[in-house]
């Protein structure tokens, strides 16, 4: 092989390996989802642990509460819908604390994550406010009444 061919192959190899590295580094930043759904919640945790590590440790209760509710939404919708009013209020307070921290962070990524957290909070409020009441099956169906007539047998 000629020296130029070897240089060309090396250049192409380095170019592709550089692209894959940059894609991996960018994947933990901001995804294209509008709010925190499965996958982007992990990326948000990585981002906050990189950019606001002290905040996460200092506000551990709020951080755990926020992530618990987002996780329930993504993995156990039934349990998410059955949260108590107190748990909902704790989530909303936690979201406010996280939003205030994101407002103080610099950079485009912080602003994008802030909008995602705000939209997530709004979506959850909408779901909770428009939840259909639980009703028992008996309210929808009538119980059949079976009458036996006396028959003359053998």
Image (cartoon, grey):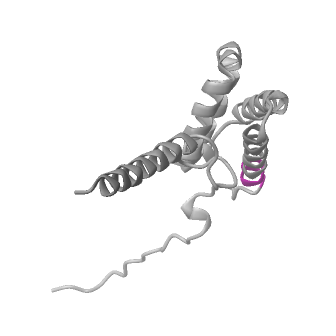
Q: Is 153 or 31 nearer to us in this picture?
A: 31
In this rendering, the answer to whether 150 lies above or below 14 is below
Residue 85 horizontal/vertical position (percent):
74, 36
Residue 75: where, in percent of width, then height? 50, 46
Q: Residue at x 54, y 45 (%)?
A: 27
The one of 94 and 51 positioned closer to us in this rendering: 51
Q: Which residues are magenta?
A: 124-129
Q: Is residue 135 left or right of residue 113?
A: left
Looking at the rendering, in which quadrant would you find the N terminus? bottom left
Q: Nearer the viewer, residue 71 or 136?
A: 71
* Residue placed most toward the observer, 88 or 150: 88
User: At x 74% / y 52%, what residue is drawn?
Assistant: 123
User: Percent position (x, y) of residue 76?
Assistant: 51, 46
Q: Residue at x 84, y 29 (%)?
A: 100
Residue 87 forms part of the magenta stretch: no
Q: Position of residue 128 (x, y in %)?
A: 73, 49
Q: Quadrant of residue 61?
A: top right
Q: In this figure, what is the number of numbered marks?
A: 0
Query: Which SS does the magenta portion mostly show?
Result: helix
Instruction: Give the left or right position of residue 30, taking residue 102 as reference.
Output: left
Choose top left, top right, bottom left or bottom right for residue 149: bottom left
Q: Residue at x 15, y 86 (%)?
A: 154
Quadrant hosting residue 146? bottom left
Relative horizontal placement of residue 16, taking residue 27 as reference (left or right): left
């Amino acid at each position: 092989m000629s020296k130029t061919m070897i240089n060309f192959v090396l250049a192409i190899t380095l170019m592709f390996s550089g692209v894959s590295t940059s894609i991996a580094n960018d994947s933990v930043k901001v995804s294209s989802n509008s709010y925190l759904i499965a996958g982007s919640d992990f990326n948000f945790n990585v981002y906050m642990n990189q950019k606001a590590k002290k905040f996460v440790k200092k506000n551990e209760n709020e951080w755990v509460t926020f992530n618990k509710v987002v996780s329930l939404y993504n993995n156990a919708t039934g349990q998410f819908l059955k949260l108590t009013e107190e748990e909902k209020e704790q989530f909303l307070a936690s979201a406010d604390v996280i939003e205030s921290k994101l407002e103080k962070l610099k950079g485009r990524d912080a602003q994008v994550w802030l909008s995602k957290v705000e939209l997530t909070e709004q979506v959850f409020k909408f779901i909770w406010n428009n939840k259909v009441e639980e009703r028992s099956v008996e309210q929808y169906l009538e119980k059949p009444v079976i009458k036996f007539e006396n028959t003359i047998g053998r």
